[in-house]
Amino acid sequence: MRQPPESPILRTLERSAYHPEVRTAARERLITAVLSPLEATLSGPDAHARARMAVSVVLGIGAMRRRVGPEEPTPADVDRLTAVFEACLAG
């Protein structure tokens, strides 16, 4: 949360996100590299849905940082974000 969100790769992906080939490749990579491994570590009901929610939080934070800029997280920010992840991942 402290580092600048600028990255040439991220900017390129955002600009080309509506290109069918890029969208398909990005989707497949997100599923195989992030979503599926997270889902595999979760036990209990609705592991797929809980993994999707947690990944959505991460992607949302990234999008917000790219548009608004990074901010120094406060201890309360960390506590809130921890609570959100715990809620997403709870089984």
Image (cartoon, grey):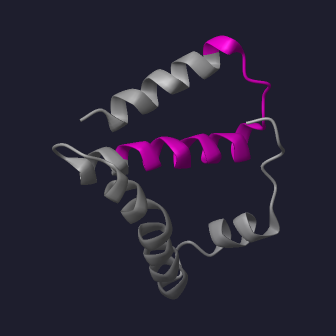
The quadrant of the picture occupied by the N terminus is top right
Residue drawn at x 36%, y 44% is 53
x, y percent for residue 62: 63, 46
Number of disc labels: 0
Q: Which residues are magenta?
A: 53-76
| x then y, percent, for residue 41 | 36, 53
Is residue 61 on the magenta stretch? Answer: yes
Establish if 69 lies above or below 48: above
Q: Going by the image, does 75 lie left or right of 3?
A: left
Q: Is residue 55 left or right of residue 16?
A: left
Q: Nearer the viewer, residue 20 or 38?
A: 38
Could you tell me residue 32's position as x and y percent?
43, 72
Residue depicted at 51% across the width and 25% down the height: 82
Camera-nearest residue between 31 and 12: 31
Q: Is residue 31 above or below residue 62?
A: below
Q: Is residue 45 left or right of residue 35?
A: left
| Helix, strand or loop: magenta stretch | helix
The answer to which of 23 and 39 lies nearer the viewer is: 39
Query: Would you say residue 57 sits in the magenta stretch?
Result: yes
Is residue 40 depicted above or below 18 in this figure?
Answer: above
